[in-house]
Image (tube, grey):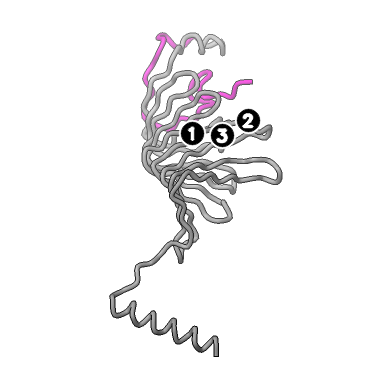
Amino acid sequence: MILLTLLAGCSHNDQKAQDKGPIKERPMAEYRDTTVLDMHDGSRLSWTLKTLHLVKWPKSDLIRAEPADLVVFDSLGAPEMWVTADSGAMDEPANFLMAKGNVHGHSRKGMDLRTDSLRWNRTGNQVSTDAIVHVVSEDGDVLTGKGFVSDANLNNWQILSDVHGVFQKVNERAQTLDSTSVKHDSTEAKPGTVTPNSAMPGFGKKHP
């Protein structure tokens, strides 16, 4: 009898809602205040996402955040990369993260990245985008291009196409590799593909 009463009450309420028009979909969960999500790899803190508005909608596997403020930590728990964006999204298992709008990434070693979108995929632990990128390397080289692939910590990275830029202190870095072919302190890169460990002497290298 209780169940029948509840069902009758629901039917009555549904009929009233239909009389008023379509029901507006409500989020499954929503937080409109400073919210912090921590992602752990075993006992190790892998990354932290901070936002002011977190929401999950029905019929969607994505959790959305506006804005997105992400910090990635190394194996010792020290911050290694920072990413901010107008918005972000992630799936519940945290297999990927997507940042969109005024994306700014910065590595602990000094590499700086600006683009419109950036995606991290747990498979391969890779960061990538098909958008136009603006990169300042840890050595001060300034490059723009389209498409970008990197490890999760922005240490080993590659601009995929349409690369233009200026390399700093080319003579000094060329001499380090016993090269005598460079004549200027800075030179403009030609369009093409740039891989940081091979494009220019000392460009984008890991430092001890």
Q: Is residue 11 above or below residue 100?
A: below
Task: Please tell me whether mark 3 or mark 2 is closer to you in this view.
Answer: 2
**SS category of the residue bearing label 1:** strand
Q: Is residue 206 magenta?
A: yes
Query: CA separation, marks 1 and 2?
Result: 24 Å
Which amino acid, by three-letter code, is at mark 2?
A: Ala
Residue at the spot x=41%, y=8% of the render?
Answer: 183
Q: Which of the 4 image quarters holds residue 55?
A: bottom left
- Mark toward the start of the polypeptide (3 vs 1): 3
> In the displayed image of the protein, which residue is found farthest to the right?
43
Residue 72 location (% of width, % of height): 57, 37
Q: Nearer the viewer, mark 1 or mark 2?
A: 2
First in sequence: mark 1 vs mark 2: 2
Label 3 or label 2, whichever comes before in sequence order: 2
Q: Amino acid at mark 1?
A: Gln
Instruction: Give the residue at mark 2.
Output: 78
Quarter of the image for the C terminus: give it.
top right
Crowd class of label 2 (few under 14; some 14 to 19; many from 20; radius 10 Å): few
- Residues under numbered marks 3 and 2 in contact, where contact means CB atoms less than 8 Å apart: no
Report if the CB atoms under discs 1 and 2 are less than 8 Å apart.
Answer: no
Q: Is residue 93 left or right of residue 51?
A: right
Residue labelled with disc 1? 158
Q: What residue occupies the far bottom of the structure in this picture?
A: 1
Q: CA distance from mark 3 to mark 2?
A: 12 Å
Chain part drawn in magenta = 180-208
Residue 153's tag is: 3
For the residue labelled by badge 3, is the local secondary structure a helix, a strand or a loop? loop
Q: In the depicted view, which residue is nearer to us: 97 or 135?
A: 97
Residue type at the position of mark 3 = Asn
Residue at x 48% of width, y 36% of height: 83
Q: Position of residue 37 (x, y in %)?
A: 55, 46
